[in-house]
Amino acid sequence: MNHLILDYELPLRLVPFAGILVGMALWESLSPRRPTFTPKWTRWIRNLGMVVIDSMILRLVIPVTAISVASSAVAHGWGLFNIIGLSGWIAIALGVVVLDLAIYGQHVMFHVIPIFWRLHKVHHTDLDVDVTTGVRFHPAEVILSMGIKMGVVLLLGAPVPAVLLFEMLLNGTSMFNHGNVHLWIGFDRWLRFLIVTPDMHRVHHSVIIRETNSNFGFNLPWWDRLFGTYRAQPAAGHDRMVIGIARYRDPKSLTLVRLLALPLLTET
């Protein structure tokens, strides 16, 4: 199975990514949760352009993937799971859960440590939140995140299927929980015990700092409840909450070039 995943890694990741992107875009058009503040197509070109730039730079800087690192760990017997002989579905499930916890911790770190916040704030400067916000990250953050992810994969000795499944879940749930889609409130209340929902994660994009520093989860919602960073609803309600960062409110200044340069600009 490992060889099959390695041979078809790109389509295995790209097809679900494209399907979820298109599906969420259609859902947003049919049943939007909030009116938008900025022109949709301008934002989409900017956000999806960031994805293209991220992919090219990442491939140049780190020419291997987390899945290939997992394959090497298995082949050489590296990592906790390989040392203790943990394999099968238990190793896959546990690998996904631990990797998700690592990404939660990384997300908190990117908010708490100023130099990392300079990178991550590019994601938060979006003045609306929709499916494309879920892929709007600065290239330097993507590279750093990949390095952290590969380190966890090596230390854990996570099996190849676990890493593939985690990558697919991380990309898919990021687009889902950033979606500007309407969910019945009763269903959302139940669903957010299993997965981070759009209403749950939208709170994290509030301009109010105490709300920004909450709901850090991307996939599994348990970590926010466990570590005390969970906030059920924004103070102003979802219809009236202001999204973004207070000092970056002019849509015309948030061009793709400026977003790429933003971490280097002096704070005012």
Image (cartoon, grey):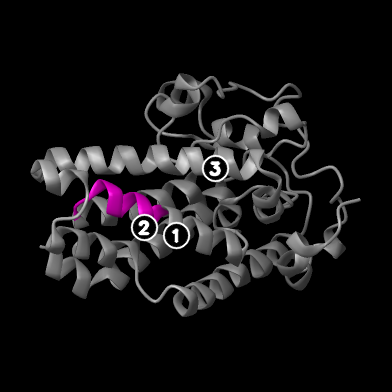
Left or right of 21, for residue 158: left
Q: Quadrant of the N terminus?
A: bottom left
Residue type for callout 3: His
Q: What residue sits 86% from the left and 52% below the top?
A: 267
Is residue 223 rendered to the left or right of residue 112?
Answer: left
Residue type, numbered disc 1? Met
**In this view, 264 is above or below 218:** below
- The image's mark for residue 209 is none
The residue labelled by disc 3 is: 107
Task: Give the mark nearer the N terminus: 2 vs 3.
Answer: 3
Disc 2 to disc 1: CB gap under 8 Å = yes
Residue that numbered label 2 is attached to: 150
Task: Identify residue for label 1.
Answer: 146
Q: Is residue 127 above or below residue 194?
A: below
Report the magenta residues as a range.
Answer: 149-159
Q: Is residue 155 magenta?
A: yes
Residue that sits furthest to the right in the current view: 268
Q: CA distance from mark 2 to mark 3?
A: 16 Å
